[in-house]
C-alpha cells in the first residue's frame, strides 16, 4: 500500500504486509547505496560492488543519484508490517522503489550464482569419501 502526496509524487511511504527487517533493510540499502562513501567499504565488498555496478550501469539502473532520503520503520513488533519512506530528487517514488527492487533481485541473482559456482568448485577440489568409493567400485 502506498501512502503518498497527491501533489508531490517524489515523496511516499510504502507499507508492506507480512514483511520484516530482512526485506526492508535490503531495499533501503539498494536505494541508499549511491550515497555510501565508497572508501569506507571493505576491499572484497568494493570489488563485488564494482562488478555489480558495472552490470547495473549497463542495464541503466544506476544512472544518477535519485534518492535523497530512504528509511524504514516497523510500527510495532507484533505487527508484521514494514513502512518504507522514500524521498527522491524528483523522480516518482513509486518508480524509484520499483527500480530498487529490481536492483535487489539482480544482487540476489549475482550472489546466488557466485555461491553456486563456489560450491561446485569446492566439490570438484574436495571429493567426499562416498564419491571416491562409488567411483572406485
Image: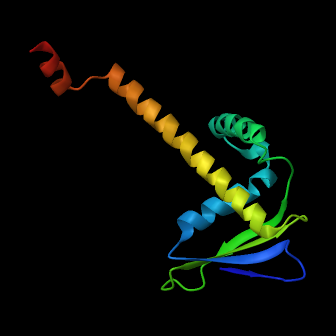
Q: Residue 82: horizontal and vertical position, in percent?
A: 60, 76
Q: Residue furthest left?
A: 137
Q: Is residue 55 above or below residue 84?
A: above
Position of residue 93 in the picture relative to residue 128 (left or right) = right
Foreground residue among 106 and 120:
106
Look at the image and name its color scheme.
Answer: rainbow
Q: Which residue is drawn at 51% across and 83% down?
A: 77
Instruction: Using the rendered view, name the quadrant where residue 22 is placed.
Output: bottom right
Residue located at (77% from left, 63% from top) = 95
72 relative to 36 in the view: left or right: left
Q: Which residue is drawn at 52% across and 72% down?
A: 19
When asked about the image quadrant of residue 42, the answer is top right
Give the quadrant of the C terminus: top left
Considering the image in quadrants, where does the N terminus appear? bottom right
Residue 5, above or below 90: below
Q: Residue 16: x, y in percent?
A: 59, 75
Query: How many numbered marks, from 0 up?
Result: 0
Identify the residue shown where x is 85% and y is 74%.
Answer: 9
Amino acid at each position: 500500500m502506498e501512502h503518498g502526496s497527491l501533489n508531490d509524487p517524489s515523496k511516499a511511504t510504502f507499507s508492506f504486509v507480512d514483511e520484516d527487517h530482512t526485506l526492508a533493510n535490503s531495499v533501503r540499502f539498494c536505494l541508499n547505496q549511491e550515497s555510501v562513501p565508497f572508501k569506507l567499504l571493505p576491499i572484497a565488498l568494493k570489488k563485488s560492488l564494482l562488478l555489480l555496478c558495472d552490470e547495473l550501469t549497463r542495464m541503466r539502473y544506476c544512472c544518477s543519484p535519485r534518492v535523497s532520503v530512504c528509511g524504514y520503520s516497523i510500527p510495532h513488533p507484533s505487527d508484521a508490517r514494514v513502512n518504507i519512506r522514500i524521498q527522491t530528487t524528483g523522480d516518482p517514488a513509486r518508480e524509484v522503489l520499483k527500480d530498487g527492487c529490481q536492483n535487489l533481485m539482480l544482487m540476489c541473482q549475482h550472489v546466488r550464482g557466485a555461491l553456486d559456482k563456489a560450491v561446485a568448485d569446492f566439490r570438484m577440489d574436495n571429493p567426499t569419501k562416498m564419491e571416491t568409493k562409488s567411483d572406485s567400485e
